[in-house]
């Protein structure tokens, strides 16, 4: 199915809007961590994972989603990219595979961190430190780069089979850890309710509800973004490899859904993993107010400078007269 110029432009604009949202949300998350006015975010290993995930999503939006939007828009004007794509395709494959694996492993690391915090709260701060978390991030980075290079050197079928294997294993780990985490929260709630006042019971119930909602959002985002992307891409590539006839319209729609679902995670991750946290919300609010106040001060200074200039001109004119 040949896309028309209007369809190319529409897809390009849609991806461009997604890229802007992803860049803005993840950039604000990173800035809030680096410029935290209350000095609270850097003291937590969990926040380091959130910032790492935001960095991966930011790179994904800048290096993959934004160029894709430009590519679709220029295709509407029949610009030939064959030579350029032939030269840059290996590098793009390595980069895409590395970012996909890094994002997937960071999701698993964040779930593991929360599982440890809920199931072993007394020893959590002793075992999970910022230094150890940085080492874990280095391991994740090296693993993603090595497998990204290895995947880029293999055939397309092996490429997507490896991605599918990582996806299935990660999904199993997430399901097991999140189930154990919910059960641990319920056990702690029953213990609190049996020996505390009604106010403490309400607080325990609210904590269970918040964590359960967070777990559901994590699983929903994971399933709605990564799973359709890898599944559709794997089925399409395998069918192409075995010379199975594919309807061109089905191929185009499946690739569009696959790419959109994957890149949507870069937009939703800042909301799910950052903006729901109270410390991040306070940092965001403070930075926005600070930027707004700085803007107002600049406008006042500009108005004062303009007024002073007008007064000097009028005084000079009066003196000459």
Image (cartoon, grey):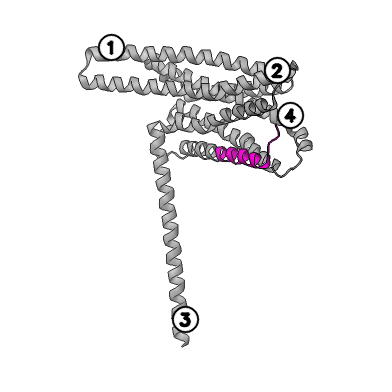
At horizontal 52% and vertical 19% (from top left) the residue drawn is 108
Q: Residue at x 75, y 17 (%)?
A: 243
Q: Residue at x 46, y 20 (%)?
A: 113
Q: CA distance from mark 1 to mark 2?
A: 54 Å
Q: Nearer the viewer, mark 1 or mark 2?
A: 2
Q: Position of residue 254 (x, y in %)?
A: 63, 26
The x and y percentages for residue 62 are 61, 37
Task: Give the number of the mark in front: 2 or 4.
Answer: 2
Q: Earlier in the sequence, mark 3 or mark 2?
A: 2
Q: Position of residue 54 (x, y in %)?
A: 52, 32
Q: Tell me if mark 2 has few (under 14), some (14-19) or many (20+) residues whose alpha carbon lies within 10 angstroms of its own.
A: some
Residue holding disc 4: 90
- Front residue of 15 and 215: 15
Q: Nearer the viewer, residue 21 or 3?
A: 3
Q: Earlier in the sequence, mark 2 or mark 4?
A: 4
| Residue picked out by circle 3 | 316
Report crowding for label 4: few under 14, some 14 to 19, many 20 or more residues within 10 A (C-alpha). Answer: some
Identify the secondary structure beneath mark 4: helix
Of the numbered discs 1 and 3, the one sitting upstream in the chain is: 1
Helix, strand or loop for the magenta stretch, by majority: helix
């Amino acid at each position: 199915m040949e896309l028309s110029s209007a369809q190319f432009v529409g897809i390009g604009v849609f991806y461009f809007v997604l890229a802007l949202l992803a860049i803005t949300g993840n950039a604000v998350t990173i800035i809030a961590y680096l410029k935290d006015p209350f000095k609270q975010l850097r003291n937590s290993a969990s926040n380091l994972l959130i910032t790492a995930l935001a960095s991966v999503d930011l790179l994904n939006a800048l290096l993959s989603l934004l160029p894709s939007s430009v590519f679709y828009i220029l295709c509407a004007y029949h610009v030939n990219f064959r030579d350029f794509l032939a030269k840059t395709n290996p590098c793009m494959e390595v980069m895409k595979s590395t970012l996909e694996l890094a994002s997937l492993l960071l999701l698993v690391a964040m779930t593991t961190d929360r599982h440890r915090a809920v199931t072993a709260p007394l020893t959590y701060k002793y075992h999970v430190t910022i230094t150890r978390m940085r080492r874990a991030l280095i391991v994740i980075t090296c693993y993603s780069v090595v497998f990204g290079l290895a995947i880029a050197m293999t055939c397309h079928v092996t490429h997507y089979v490896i991605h599918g294997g990582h996806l299935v294993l990660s999904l199993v780990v997430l399901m097991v850890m999140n189930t154990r985490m919910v059960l641990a929260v319920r056990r702690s709630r029953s213990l609190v309710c049996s020996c505390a006042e009604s106010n403490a019971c309400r607080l325990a119930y609210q904590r269970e509800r918040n964590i359960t909602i967070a777990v559901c959002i994590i699983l929903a985002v994971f399933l709605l973004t990564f799973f359709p992307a890898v599944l559709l891409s794997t089925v399409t590539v395998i069918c192409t490899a075995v010379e199975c006839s594919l309807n061109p319209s089905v191929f185009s729609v499946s690739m569009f859904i696959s790419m959109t679902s994957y890149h949507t995670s870069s937009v939703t991750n800042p909301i799910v993993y950052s903006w729901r946290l109270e410390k991040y919300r306070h940092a965001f609010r403070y930075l926005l107010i600070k930027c707004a106040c700085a803007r107002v001060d600049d406008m006042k200074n500009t108005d004062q400078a303009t007024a002073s200039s007008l007064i000097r001109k009028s005084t000079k004119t009066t003196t000459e007269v």
